[in-house]
Image: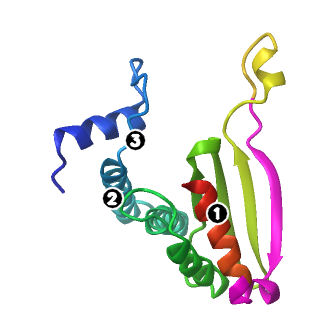
Amino acid sequence: MALSAGATAYLYHYVVLPPQLPQKDNHDAAHERSLFEVVIHALVDLKEKVKSGHKNTITSAIATVENLRDSRVTYGYVSEIQLQELLLKLMRCETDGAVPLEIKAQNADILVSGCAESLIFEFFELSPTIQAATQEGPLTRTFLDYVLSVPIVKAANSDLRSSIAGTIAKIAT
């Protein structure tokens, strides 16, 4: 996979995290997609080299990054239709990974997982609280804020899945 100079710089800034990071928003959906592909490729290579006891963990990581990639449209935003399909895959236990969703405007994430009994929505605020930011000493963050469980019986309702996917796609855009 040949990467452009811009994509390579983007990967460098998001994977290596050098001391001189860009001081402005440098989001580029095409470069982000390249990042996903490089990570997936690296995980596939890693899976071939680990002991059999670790292969399931790597398989789950690969599926999770693929789900993140597959939840988005070309412009990098969460797609309502693609998210509905991923929720259905989770319900049917057709994916080994979770579905991570980035809500850029809120600097937050939603991690959707589950199978068989319920869909689990975990909500993460990535910014520190005001209280944590104003305290002396090292910054302490707590990422998990809320968890919501939707029983599969209720999640089987296509109108509910459509409403959930539509709401998430709207706030993620």
x, y percent for residue 151: 82, 81
Residue in the picture at 61% in, 84% down: 88
Q: Is mark 3 in CB contact (under 8 Å) with mark 2?
A: no
Q: Distance from label 1 to label 2 (Cα)?
A: 24 Å
Quadrant in the rendering for residue 158 = bottom right
Q: Which mark is nearer the camera, 1 or 2? A: 1
Q: Of marks 3 and 2, which one's residue comes earlier in the chain?
A: 3
Q: Which residue is mark 2?
A: 37
Residue in the picture at 56% in, 46% down: 104
- How many other residues sit within 10 Å of disc 1, few (<14), some (14-19) or many (≥20)? some
- How many other residues sit within 10 Å of disc 2, few (<14), some (14-19) or many (≥20)? some
- Amino acid carrying mark 2 in the image: Glu
Left or right: residue 66 versus residue 113 is: left
- Which residues lie in the magenta part? 141-159
Q: Which mark is residue 168?
A: 1
- Amino acid carrying mark 3 in the image: His
Dot 2 lies on which element? helix
Quadrant the N terminus occupies: bottom left
Q: Which residue is mark 3?
A: 27
- How many other residues sit within 10 Å of disc 3, few (<14), some (14-19) or many (≥20)? few
Quadrant in the rendering for residue 85 = bottom right
Residue in the picture at 63% in, 56% down: 171
Left or right: residue 138 versus residue 95 is: right
In this rendered view, identify the residue nearer to me: 7 or 40: 7
Left or right: residue 41 versus residue 2 is: right
Dot 1 lies on which element? helix
Q: Residue furthest top?
A: 136
Q: Of marks 3 and 1, which one's residue comes earlier in the chain?
A: 3
**Does 54 sit above or below residue 30?**
below
Q: Is residue 149 inside the magenta stretch?
A: yes
- Amino acid carrying mark 1 in the image: Ile
